Image: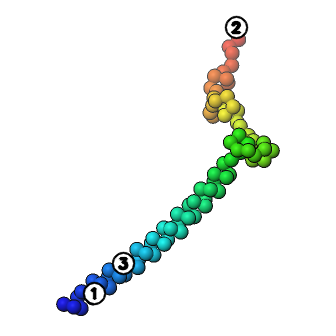
């Protein structure tokens, strides 16, 4: 019976080591998350929400807008319209 109890104690000890290892890993990840959040907060600052001068703002390059994007309409799909090829009958 004593040997059976030792088996359970070994399993418990192994699980405790695993839990401590996971807790250490979680702590490392929490620290890394804090670092990244601080970095993101720093990158989001510009002259409108901090004391930085406007010249330090990051300017995004202009995106070429298509005709459709500019006026919100779609162009004609396909080739020429069927009716544009009709010939007028002479009067």
Q: Position of residue 41 (x, y in %)?
A: 63, 51
For image coordinates 45% across by 72% down, the residue present is 22
Q: Position of residue 70 (x, y in %)?
A: 69, 31
Element type where label 3 sits in the image: helix
* Screen quadrant of the C terminus: top right
Q: Which mark is residue 7?
A: 1
Residue indicated by mark 3? 15
Residue contact between numbered discs 3 and 2, judged by CB atoms under 8 Å: no
- Relative to 2, is 15 above or below? above
Q: Position of residue 78 (x, y in %)?
A: 63, 34
Element type where label 1 sits in the image: helix
Mark 3: few/some/many CA within 10 Å (<14, 14-19, 20+): few
Residue indicated by mark 2? 91
Instruction: State the count of labels.
Output: 3
Instruction: State which quadrant residue 37 falls in.
Output: bottom right
Q: Nearer the viewer, mark 3 or mark 2?
A: 3
How far apart are labels 1 and 2 at the CA level? 107 Å
In the visual, does 28 lie left or right of 2?
right
- Is there any visible trace of residue 76 in the rendered image? no
- Relative to 50, is 28 above or below? below
Instruction: State which quadrant residue 53 falls in.
Output: top right
Mark 2: few/some/many CA within 10 Å (<14, 14-19, 20+): few
Instruction: State which quadrant residue 60 falls in.
Output: top right
* Screen quadrant of the N terminus: bottom left
Specify which label sits upstream in the sequence, 3 or 1.
Answer: 1
For image coordinates 73% across by 44% down, the residue present is 51
How far apart are labels 3 and 1 at the CA level? 12 Å
Q: Nearer the viewer, residue 4 or 69?
A: 4
Q: Position of residue 13 (x, y in %)?
A: 35, 82
Q: Residue furthest left?
A: 1
- Is there any visible trace of residue 33 in the rendered image? yes
């Amino acid at each position: 019976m004593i040997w059976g109890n030792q088996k359970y104690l070994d399993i418990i000890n192994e699980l405790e080591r695993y839990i401590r290892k996971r807790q250490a890993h979680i702590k490392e990840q929490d620290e890394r998350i804090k670092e990244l959040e601080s970095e993101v907060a720093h990158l989001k600052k510009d002259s409108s929400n901090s004391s930085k001068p406007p010249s330090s703002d990051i300017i995004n390059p202009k995106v070429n807008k298509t005709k459709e994007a500019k006026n919100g309409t779609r162009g004609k799909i396909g080739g020429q319209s069927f009716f544009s090829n009709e010939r007028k009958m002479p009067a």
